Image: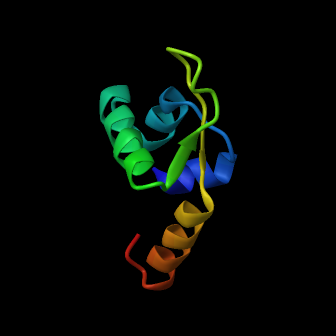
Amino acid sequence: MMRSIRNSRVVKASEVARSTDRSIQNISRAIKECEEQKLVECITPEKHTWKKYMLTDQGHHVLRELEKHKMI
């Protein structure tokens, strides 16, 4: 999921769901967990639907470390 966000820079949950072949509900839950860990940030918090997200600096760092250690 984090790679999808990094590759597109800004995404909606529905776009990640489509590209990863997962349900929107699962992706929305994963995004919320990543937000709580400060790995992704909602850049349209005023919206109730079709929110857009991007990786934070911390998210980029975690993704690089995971890739470096071949964990994803």
Is 16 placed above or below 39 here? above
Residue lying farthest to the bottom in this orientation: 69
| Residue appearing at x 48%, y 31% in the figure | 13
Query: Could you tell me how many numbered marks the image carries?
Result: 0
Q: Position of residue 59 (x, y in %)?
A: 53, 61
Is 54 placed above or below 26 here? below
| Residue appearing at x 49%, y 70% in the figure | 62
| Residue appearing at x 52%, y 49% in the figure | 40
| Residue appearing at x 49%, y 56% in the figure | 39
Q: Position of residue 49 (x, y in %)?
A: 51, 15
Image quarter (top left, top right, bottom left or bottom right) of the C terminus: bottom left
Residue lying farthest to the right in this orientation: 9
**Front residue of 57 and 7:** 57
Answer yes or no: is residue 22 visible: no
**Front residue of 7 and 37:** 37
Rendered image coloring scheme: rainbow
Answer yes or no: is residue 19 visible: yes
Q: Position of residue 10 (x, y in %)?
A: 67, 40
Q: Position of residue 41 (x, y in %)?
A: 56, 44
Give the quadrant of residue 29. top left
Is 6 placed above or below 68 here? above
